[in-house]
Amino acid sequence: MPPKTMFEKIWDAHVVHAEPGEAAILYVDLHLVHEVTSAQAFDGLRMAGRRVRRTDLTVATADHNTPTWDLSLPVTDEISQKQLDALSRNCEEFGVTLYDRFSPMQGIVHIIGPDLGYTQPGKTVVCGDSHTSTHGAMGAYAVGIGTSEVEHVLATQTLRQFKPKAMEVRVNGALPSGVTAKDLILGIIGRIGVNGGVGHVIEYTGEAVRSLSMEGRMTVCNMSIEAGARAGMIAPDDTTFDYLRGRRFAPQGKAFDEAVEQWRELPTDAGASYDRVEEIDAAGLEPFVTWGINPGMVVPVTGRVPDPASMTDPNEREVAERALTYMDLEPDTPMTDVKIDRVFIGACTNARLEDLRAAAEVVKGRQVHRDVYAMVVPGSALIKKQAEEEGLDRIFTDAGFDWRVAGCSMCLGMNPDILEPGQRCAATSNRNFENRQGKGGRTHLVSPAMAAAAGVAGHFVDIREW
Amino acid sequence: MEPFVKVNGLVAPLDRVNVDTDQIIPAVYLKSIQRTGFGEHLFSPWRYHADGSPNPDFVLNDPAYRSATVLATGRNFGCGSSREHAPWALGEYGFRCIIAPSFADIFYNNCFQNGLLPVRLPDEDVRRIIDLALAKPGMRLNVDLESQRAWTDDGEVSVSFEIDAARRHALLNGLDDIGLTLQHEEKIAAYERGRGI
Ligand code: SF4
């Protein structure tokens, strides 16, 4: 057999039907559903008299629109409540498992998938959400889809897709100390650009990737979409298997060992070729901060706000000028002089236990700066509980952070957690688009430790000097 | 789905790159459980001031472009989230065709599900269309999916584009993907049996 990439192996194993020149029909092993992109899909099924083909492979949660205040308080936004009610009704009517706002297993859809053991190596995973790429960290092929495709998957358990190309991003060497998975992916996007991965599935390889924890790998794969990639993936290994063992919906006992044997076959064969390869030297990476309005606009924390006047490409200059106007930044300002108003530690990028631990370590025994409002929003109810068992909540609240219940929260500004116009935020999320965290809000993407340190100092700081 | 065959439409130039879905339709407007009601919020962060009044500097608030059905814009249009509310909002506003040097993958797919034609053209062609539309407000473009050509009646623009055959066929005929896939229902069942799932 000719050598294959991991992506090809998973793709080939899921083709139900393919004809040249047409989209392949691909079987879907896991379909994750949330409230914002599913209502119209369920309506479509209802109108056509269709059912959900495989309720056993479909799981729903409420995350985007849920308030993160105390669960005993009601949802004050009527339209949000309607959307949450629609999800509950649809799941009940069609027989889909739902972890609603009050469930102990609720959380951000891309956090609970791996956390509960639903996401496994070799699976095809889809969700009506672009950050489905997160699940690729387990060695799965995971893609975000639109609502029409959600309806298609509900009805047929398959997805029609043209086969993307495969791209390898190899990160050689070890990450320097103080440089996290978040910095790694920001560095990669800074290098290849926000459309550098369009049409491709990125497989991250190399020593720096192999030595990342499962949580770190998820952070990296999460932001693949910010490079425009269709998906991100990392070959499963002992780190993956150790993470999965014993998780609620993972195979148990002997079945798990058998599964591991099969999963060991998944990594890319020696001699397989990618359509494109990018190599990055880990030693050259630093803690990063974004300065502009997309995740590719990034500089090391030791760097300065770029000066558009020094850019030779007129298009690039104009885009940079517009970004600086929106961000209200002066060219050449050292990033460590940039003062912030808010800190958001959360989102499917960085709201796992390891992320919360890293942030807690930084703020322990210190106080949030008097001009800053800081909040921590754990990625799931389960993570919140674990963090509380470890006493992390106390570390945060003692330091003056708000400790919230799980959800997407200020990552996308759909619930009441939003920036006021003009406010500047150090955020662990994945998108610094204009107006995303609230109209006129200014977002700087950083790692959890960097966000926490900025909250204490009131401005960005180099975490290596903390 | 509404088929797309051909339009003769007024072109609105949106001269920006990397227009993301948070600008096309911000998350606060995604709470509706209907497929409609998004058009009025299309590009709302740019189209309206904070107090809700129209921003006269935004292209769609210029009376000369208000009735546009073709949008010409910069590379990587539709990047960001998977929200199909983005093509819904564009379609409801009245757009039938988006022309750009490149599109984000999920957005590109979503367009085809909604009778909206995304046309990829080389940078310099898009540049010319944007410049012409800016210089001559009211410029109309013919876009014909069957022949995969776009042109102005005065001949200033005449370009061809490519859409892969399967997508073109589906769009021309307004075919429903689910119906097509369910013709292979027996294969899906056989696949499930084969894997014992
Ligand atoms: S946390 Fe943010 S990026 Fe992740 S699923 Fe929620 S809204 Fe999307």
Image: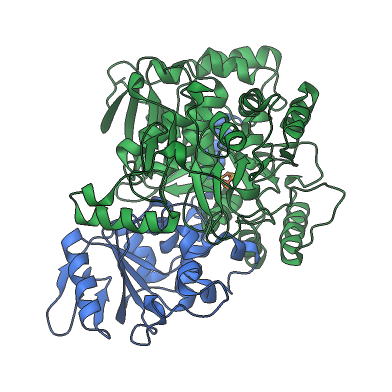
Chain colours: A green, B blue
Q: How many labels sit on residues?
A: 0
How far across and down, in percent of the image, does residue A54 sit? Answer: 65, 44
Vertical comparison of A202 with A365: above or below = below
Q: Nearer the viewer, residue B182 or B27?
A: B27
Q: Could you tell whether B149 is left or right of B11 in the image?
A: left
Residue positioned 24% across, 78% down in the render = B133
The foreground one among B57 and A216 is B57
Residue A201 visible in image: no
Q: Is residue A390 above or below residue B107?
A: above
Q: Measuring 47% from the left and 33% from the top, which residue is drawn there? A: A221
Q: Is residue A29 left or right of residue B149?
A: right
Task: Where is residue B81? Give x, y as percent.
Answer: 49, 52
Q: Quadrant of residue A349?
A: top right
Residue nearer the viewer, B66 or A239: B66
Q: Is residue A322 left or right of residue A53?
A: left
Instruction: Indicate the quadrant containing the N terminus of chain A: top left, top right, bottom left or bottom right.
Output: top left
Q: Is residue B39 left or right of residue A296?
A: right
Going 33% across and 44% down the picture, which residue do you hit? A332
| Quarter of the image where one finds residue B144 | bottom left
Residue B117 pos. (x, y %): 35, 67
- Residue furthest out toward the right: A72
Quadrant position of the C terminus of chain A in the picture: top right
> Can residue A449 be seen at all in this image of the molecule?
yes
Q: Residue A138 at x, y = what percent?
A: 53, 26
